[in-house]
């Protein structure tokens, strides 16, 4: 009987080994975030490389686009590093560093979007004096402030402002505390409101200019300039709508949820937020005529005639 029991135990253990479901080693959502980070890093690295290598792209507008691309590039690298550290190092220190990098990078990305909006508003409101030295100095000041503030936000988890010691204070994004995520979310809502106000003013200025030009040419509705101006206003609506659609779900969810909520909800709102960094180069860089020329020169060594002769229109605003 004893030998039969031993054989039965061995048989059951073999059955458990072969038929027991294996534990999930890698969270599929983490794979999605890592894949998004890889795409973000590759896409924005191309923009940074083009602006860095082309001396003609040193105007304030291109510096701000370069700042946005650099922030998104670091955000993509942060997502990849966070995935690597979470499944290889499994260290709290590494987690703090990678989360800090992601927070600082995405903060710099949002601040850069605000800086671009301010620059576009000033370029229209002060059209005659926009290309002065004051504009360049103001641009450098904005860059220093936005990167300094983003760095301070990213250093918070590393300096001890985290929830590793007390899980009850954690937010939906560990190791950020509920207070940290609340400050970030409220700041985002304020920045979004400011961007909305600036884009409304930009639309008013563009439409007023289009109306004045149309009256000078004695035609309004059928004017090509009027049509392209409407496209410009539509472009601004797409820019702001895309930004809100990507970031608003995660922002609102971060304010109402805490660490007790299922992680699925956090991933489902965080992944669309990362897609904003995928879309940014398409909206702000690849549509720009000068950057298009630089990209063609880098990739093919020539510029197509259709790109070289395309005139700038209000839809490029």
Image (cartoon, helix red, strand yellow):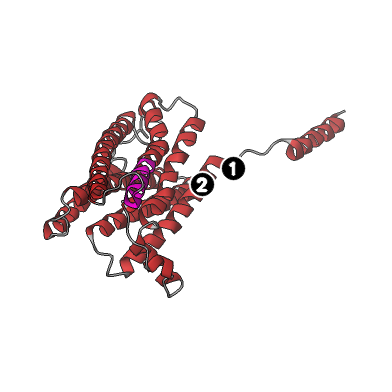
**In the drawing, what numbered circle is on residue 25?**
1
Give the position of the N terminus as an image quadrant: top right
Whole-percent x and y of residue 311? 34, 61
Find out whether residue 81 is within the magenta segment: no
Secondary structure beneath label 2: helix
Q: Residues within 10 Å of mark 1 (few under 14, many from 20)?
A: few
First to last magenta residue range: 223-239
- Left or right of 154? Residue 242 is right
Q: Visible in this render: residue 179? A: yes
Give the main secondary structure of the magenta stretch: helix
Query: Which of these two is toward me, 255 or 85?
Result: 255
Q: Visible in this render: residue 151? A: no
**In the drawing, what numbered circle is on residue 60?**
none
- Name the residue rendered at 57%, 41% in the picture: 28
Whole-percent x and y of residue 179? 30, 29
- Left or right of 226? Residue 267 is right
CA–CA distance in space, label 2 to label 1: 9 Å
- Residue pointed to by mark 2: 87
Q: Quadrant of residue 259?
A: top left
């Amino acid at each position: 009987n004893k030998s039969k029991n031993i054989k039965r135990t061995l048989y059951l253990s073999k059955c458990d080994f072969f038929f027991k479901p294996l534990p999930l080693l890698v969270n599929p959502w983490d794979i999605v975030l890592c894949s998004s980070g890889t795409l973000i890093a590759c896409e924005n690295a191309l923009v940074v490389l083009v602006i860095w290598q082309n001396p003609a792209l040193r105007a304030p507008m291109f510096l701000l686009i370069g700042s946005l691309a650099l922030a998104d590039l670091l955000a993509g690298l942060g997502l990849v590093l966070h995935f690597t550290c979470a499944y290889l190092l499994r260290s709290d220190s590494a987690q703090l560093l990678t989360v800090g990098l992601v927070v600082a990078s995405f903060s710099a990305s949002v601040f850069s979007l605000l800086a671009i909006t301010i620059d576009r508003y000033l370029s229209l409101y002060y059209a005659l004096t926009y290309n002065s030295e004051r504009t360049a100095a103001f641009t450098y000041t904005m860059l220093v402030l936005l990167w300094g503030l983003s760095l301070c936000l990213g250093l918070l988890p590393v300096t001890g402002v985290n929830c590793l010691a007390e899980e009850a204070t954690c937010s939906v994004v560990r190791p950020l505390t509920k207070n940290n995520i609340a400050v970030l979310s409220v700041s985002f809502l304020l920045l979004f409101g400011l961007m909305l106000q600036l884009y409304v003013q930009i639309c008013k200025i563009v439409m007023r200019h289009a109306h004045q030009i149309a009256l000078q040419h004695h035609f309004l509705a059928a004017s090509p300039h009027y049509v392209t101006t409407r496209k410009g206003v539509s472009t601004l609506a797409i820019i702001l709508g895309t930004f809100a659609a990507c970031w608003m779900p995660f922002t609102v969810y971060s304010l109402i949820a805490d660490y007790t909520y299922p992680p699925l909800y956090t991933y489902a709102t965080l992944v669309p937020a990362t897609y904003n960094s995928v879309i940014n180069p398409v909206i702000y860089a690849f549509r720009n005529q000068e950057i298009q020329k630089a990209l063609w020169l880098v990739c093919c060594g020539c510029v197509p005639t259709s790109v070289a002769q395309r005139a700038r229109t209000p839809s490029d605003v």
